[in-house]
Image: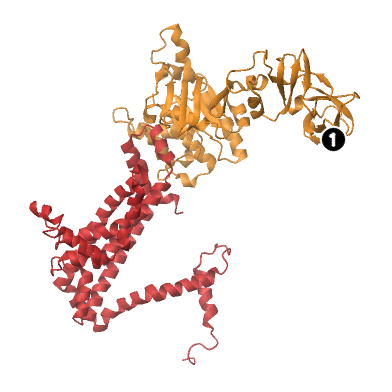
Chain colours: A red, B orange
């Protein structure tokens, strides 16, 4: 109406002033160039993270809401989503328990050779996930070192949801250990000593003093392991067996849909995963902030 | 059983009865029963370095004892041994009439206030104070209402009642200190142990809290042992002071005993500023070492051993007497410092090797450039291979 895009309106200072308003007001200007750094960061985050996510969110609607609904009401899709989130949840819980134990051993018990053990914790990060998946499959297959004795007691791990959980625990465990261990190490020994002088037995010290101090870290580790588990692909597809409705995970289904040139369907599954994962992480974050131990950290 | 009687000194005998345990049968046991803590031959070695060596120490019931010494003297180690937090020590240790040498910390019935307070930061102030009661086995655990009442009472006692629902992170240093104390007192410990309790407080709060702590100790009839590196703090708060050095007990005594009859020059020096002279005492004549050898001595301590001696004085105990004798010391300069004149005096005319002494400002100050002799009659003397008026003890020197 008024002759194009607002003549004389220079976008740059306006954008900066909007940014400036977003900054906490009392931020002291001690860091030189805080504003340009923030702008640069936001641009990068936008390009690398937000733009692809926005594209993903936009894609399924292009074929119309009906197509989206159709893609999502498919039995196979629902089964795959249920499997992915279910196994990720189970694996994250297992990771949290095992990770706490491992962190405890590395941080407090310190058996001989704990440094080596400490270094090995990170191996699953470095190992190509496919290698991990193939190795686990070989181990847990009916003829494998672990699979054979398990088969004798009637347990099947490879090519079942249980196998998927095993793979997810493998890749998720380092997250919990790496998040919990530094917190555990930083807890002053005086806390345990104070509890002891007040008459607490070792189990009471662990349960009432140490664990509560670790809750936020455990919640964070749980969230990371869960998020990794939902999206994990490489290590899972070998051990899962990938039978539709039984052991086919959602990320694999996306690949299958892509191979069928069903881009809309693939994006629909992707969108649901994105939303569900975001919701779960928000819940974990909210839970962590409500934990009383955080009161020492968050004002 | 659960409530402190906070009405005043009358509370003291009541608490002592509580702890008597009927062990006060014979007269010979009376001394042992009155002991709040007794240590015999306690040693502790870290790797190869002995942290604490062969300590014998008795703290009387109701006494406030301070462990002082330079850092690394072993005072905190000794406190942790008493608390049961330091494994691997030798010797024996009794709290009250009960031998606790092999008793773990949780069963020693002590209260420990840590230097950094070690409050549980995920618990409110009230929950922190209640902790010691909540972890008791069901049989001896008070019910919820009794615990709540006791917590309220303790918070009142340490004057932080309005803060019950706060978290440690929301408290000031002084408030944390009080909460830590309340938590330690909640289980009615037979013994209160304090590790540098004022170390993290700013000077004003520190002064206030230590006066208050001492009053609380008296009111509750506690037996307390405090570790500090600040001798002024120890002198102000404690009934008796144990001076540690290199893991050994140098001397134990009341502040005035330590001041008047220090066992070693170290004790004298540790408790305040000193001026020290070395010399030889032979046939009743004292000759100071250079550079003071030529300075006229117009007074010497009455009782001194024969042989090599060292004399230690507070700066205000060195008296300067005007004299024109040859070799007289020279006043370098004079400054007013509160109730004193700070006088620098040198053994020779060129002003080298000057020492600082304090002269009362009620008297006219010596003029710079004038000459004087030394009157050391108020000095503590140490050494002398024959007699030292019984002031030497076996350890250390």
The location of residue B224, given as percent across then percent down, is 50, 26
Q: Is residue A258 above or below residue B269?
A: below
Q: Nearer the viewer, residue B295 or B97?
A: B295
Taking the spot 30% from the left edge, 30% from the top edge, the residue there is B137
Q: Quadrant of the N terminus of chain B?
A: top left
- Name the side, left or right, on which A94 lies relative to B126: left
Taking the spot 84% from the left edge, 35% from the top edge, the residue there is B332
**Residue B240 in sight:** no
The location of residue B240, given as percent across then percent down, is 57, 22
The location of residue A133, given as percent across then percent down, is 22, 64
Q: Is residue B223 above or below residue B165?
A: above
The location of residue B131, given as percent across then percent down, is 38, 36
- Which quadrant holds residue A276? bottom left
Q: Nearer the viewer, residue A80 or A17?
A: A80
Q: Could you tell me which secondary element the residue under label 1 belongs to? A: strand
Q: Which chain letter goes with mark 1?
A: B
**Residue B74 in sight:** yes
Say which residue label 1 marks. B332
């Amino acid at each position: 109406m008024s002759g194009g895009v607002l003549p004389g309106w220079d976008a740059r200072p306006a954008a900066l002033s909007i940014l400036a308003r977003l900054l906490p007001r009392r931020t002291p200007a001690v860091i030189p160039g805080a504003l340009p750094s923030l702008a640069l960061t936001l641009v990068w985050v936008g390009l690398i993270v937000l733009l692809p996510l926005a594209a993903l969110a936009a894609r399924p609607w292009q074929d119309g809401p009906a197509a989206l609904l159709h893609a999502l009401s498919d039995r196979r899709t629902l089964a795959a989503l249920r499997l992915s989130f279910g196994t990720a949840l189970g694996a994250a819980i297992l990771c949290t328990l095992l990770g706490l134990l491992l962190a405890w051993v590395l941080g407090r018990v310190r058996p001989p050779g704990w440094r080596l053990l400490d270094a090995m914790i990170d191996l699953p990060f470095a190992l190509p996930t496919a290698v991990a998946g193939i190795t686990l499959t070989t181990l847990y297959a009916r003829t494998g070192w672990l699979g054979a004795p398990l088969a004798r007691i009637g347990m099947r791990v490879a090519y079942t949801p249980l196998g998927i959980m095993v793979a997810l625990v493998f890749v998720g465990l380092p997250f919990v250990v790496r998040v919990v261990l530094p917190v555990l190490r930083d807890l002053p020994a005086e806390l345990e000593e104070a509890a002891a002088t007040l008459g607490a037995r070792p189990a009471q010290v662990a349960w009432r003093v140490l664990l509560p101090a670790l809750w936020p870290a455990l919640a964070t580790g749980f969230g990371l392991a869960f998020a990794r588990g939902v999206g994990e692909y490489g290590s899972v597809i070998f051990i899962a067996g990938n039978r539709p409705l039984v052991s086919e995970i959602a990320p694999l289904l996306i690949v299958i849909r892509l191979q069928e040139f069903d881009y809309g369907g693939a994006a629909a599954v992707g969108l649901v995963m994105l939303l569900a994962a975001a919701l779960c992480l928000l819940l974990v974050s909210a839970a962590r902030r409500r934990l009383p131990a955080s009161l020492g950290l968050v004002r | 059983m659960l409530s402190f009687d906070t009405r005043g000194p009358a509370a003291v005998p009541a608490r002592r009865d509580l702890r008597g345990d009927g062990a006060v049968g014979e007269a010979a046991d009376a001394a042992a029963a009155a002991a709040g803590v007794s240590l015999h031959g306690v040693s502790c070695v870290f790797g190869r370095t002995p942290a604490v060596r062969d300590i014998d120490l008795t703290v009387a019931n109701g006494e406030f004892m301070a462990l002082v010494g330079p850092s690394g003297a072993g005072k905190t180690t000794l406190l942790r041994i008493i608390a049961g937090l330091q494994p691997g020590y030798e010797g024996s240790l009794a709290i009250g009439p009960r031998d606790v040498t092999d008793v773990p910390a949780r069963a020693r019935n002590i209260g420990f206030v840590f230097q950094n307070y070690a409050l549980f930061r995920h618990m409110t102030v009230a929950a922190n104070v209640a902790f010691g009661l909540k972890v008791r086995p069901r049989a001896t655990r008070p019910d919820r209402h009794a615990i709540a009442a006791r917590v309220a009472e303790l918070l009142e006692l340490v004057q932080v009642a309005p803060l019950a629902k706060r978290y440690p992170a929301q408290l000031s240093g002084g408030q944390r200190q009080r909460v830590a104390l309340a938590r330690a007192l909640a289980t009615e410990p037979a013994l209160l142990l304090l590790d540098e309790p004022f170390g993290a407080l700013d000077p004003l709060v520190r002064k206030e809290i230590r006066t208050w702590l001492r009053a609380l100790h008296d009111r509750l009839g506690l037996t307390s042992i405090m570790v500090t590196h600040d001798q002024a703090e120890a002198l102000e708060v404690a009934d008796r002071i144990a001076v540690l050095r290199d893991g050994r007990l140098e001397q134990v005594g009341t502040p005035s005993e330590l001041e008047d009859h220090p066992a070693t020059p170290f004790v004298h020096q540790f408790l305040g500023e000193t001026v020290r002279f070395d010399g030889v005492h032979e046939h009743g004549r004292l000759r100071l070492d250079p550079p003071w050898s030529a300075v006229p001595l117009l007074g010497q301590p009455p009782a001194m051993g024969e042989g090599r001696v060292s004399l230690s004085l507070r700066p205000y105990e060195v008296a300067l007497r005007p004299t024109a004798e040859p070799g007289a010391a020279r006043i370098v300069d004079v400054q007013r410092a509160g109730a004193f004149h700070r006088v620098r005096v040198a053994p020779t005319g060129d002003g080298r090797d000057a020492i600082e002494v304090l002269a009362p400002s009620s008297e006219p100050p010596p003029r710079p450039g004038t000459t004087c002799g030394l009157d050391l009659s108020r000095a503590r003397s140490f050494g002398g291979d024959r007699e030292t008026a019984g002031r030497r003890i076996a350890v250390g020197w």
